[in-house]
Image: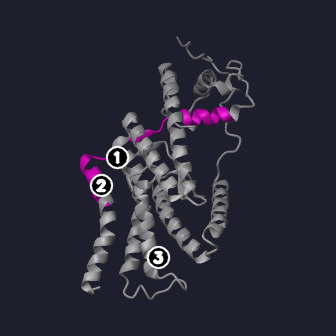
Amino acid sequence: MDQPIPIPGEIPAEIPKPELEEPKNKMNVWIKSALSLALYLALGYFIFSRNWVFLLIVTAIIIFHELGHFIAMKIFKYNDLGIFFIPLLGAYVSGTKQEVSQQQSAIILLAGPVPGIIVGTIFMLIPGNYNIMISETISLDEVGKAAILLNLLNLLPIFPLDGGQLIHRLFLDNSRIIGNIFLIASAGLLTWVAISSGIYPLLIFPFMMLTRMVRDMQNDKIIAKIEGEGIDLVKSYDQLSAEEYWRIRNAVIKHYPQFRDVNPSPPYEISPKEELIINVIQGLLQRTVIQDLSLAGKFLIMVIWVACFAAPFLLDLSVRSSFRI
């Protein structure tokens, strides 16, 4: 039977909760974002046979997509926002928020692909778009098709794509088992796509997904033990009191083998591994997910999701029929 987590007791006023050695700031985030974009462009330049025009068009579509997510997260007051590029694979927006709204999450996830599909459809409907050349070999019509295709791919119900995250947030958040089945199915499908298409960098996604799932399952067991000791983990790191920090720290030392050489408190001594311990504690703290979407609201979101797939093709067919193409 597990022994209870040691309780530090009354902590002296001069023993505060340790802070991160390198607090996040806006400048650091944007420097990392710029560096990731530079690496993305450098590798893309050689992968796409040094075709700058094609690379810049694809990059512009991706940036437009990510800006949709970024603006929506900014409106909903997410912190530490940044856009980060993954060479050969795309980009993502990073941000933090203690209370996560189901409704806001759905809007954020749709704010990336929906504007891109709308703009791509407009490009395809402009009269004479075949003759409007962006470069010697790429027309405005082709740019529109590329924008629609890339954003529709992102809406596929496969994790970690926007469509997969949307399905997960709307229907699977309350069931860890069903959510894990969905993740495993997504990982299997992505693995098949990567191997069958020869796009092996895609394998990084299923690897990261399965690794995170295993880590989350391990964390769930530890979280249950910590909360069983009466410690509230539904809060951010900044909201932790010094006493809560040192109690959770003792639990981390107890349950994580890599910290077995760290002395529990008291005494309240900062370990050379303190930064790693803080990162683990941050991973254990739970965000509050607000289930604020009714059945009608979920239905409306799904109608928008289906319409994204149908609208570009229906509009294109309508225009072609009008001009008898």
Magenta part of the protein: which range? 276-304
Tag of residue 143: 3
The amino acid pointed to by label 2 is Met
Tag of residue 302: 2
Frontmost residue, 238 versus 325: 325
Q: Position of residue 56 (x, y in %)?
A: 58, 73
Question: Is residue 321 shown above or below 79?
Answer: below
Question: Is residue 194 shown above or below 45?
Answer: above
| Residue for point 62% across, 75% down | 52
Q: Are marks 2 and 1 in contact (CB under 8 Å)?
A: yes
The amino acid pointed to by label 3 is Val
Tell which circle, 2 or 1, labels the residue nearer the N-terminal end. Answer: 1
Quadrant hosting residue 199: bottom right
Frontmost residue, 97 versus 62: 62
The amino acid pointed to by label 1 is Leu
Secondary structure of the residue carrying numbered label 2: helix
Asked whether residue 12 is in view, the answer is yes
Tell which circle, 3 or 2, labels the residue nearer the N-terminal end. Answer: 3
Tag of residue 170: 1
| Residue for point 37% across, 74% down | 121
Frontmost residue, 137 versus 200: 200
Q: Residue furthest top?
A: 1
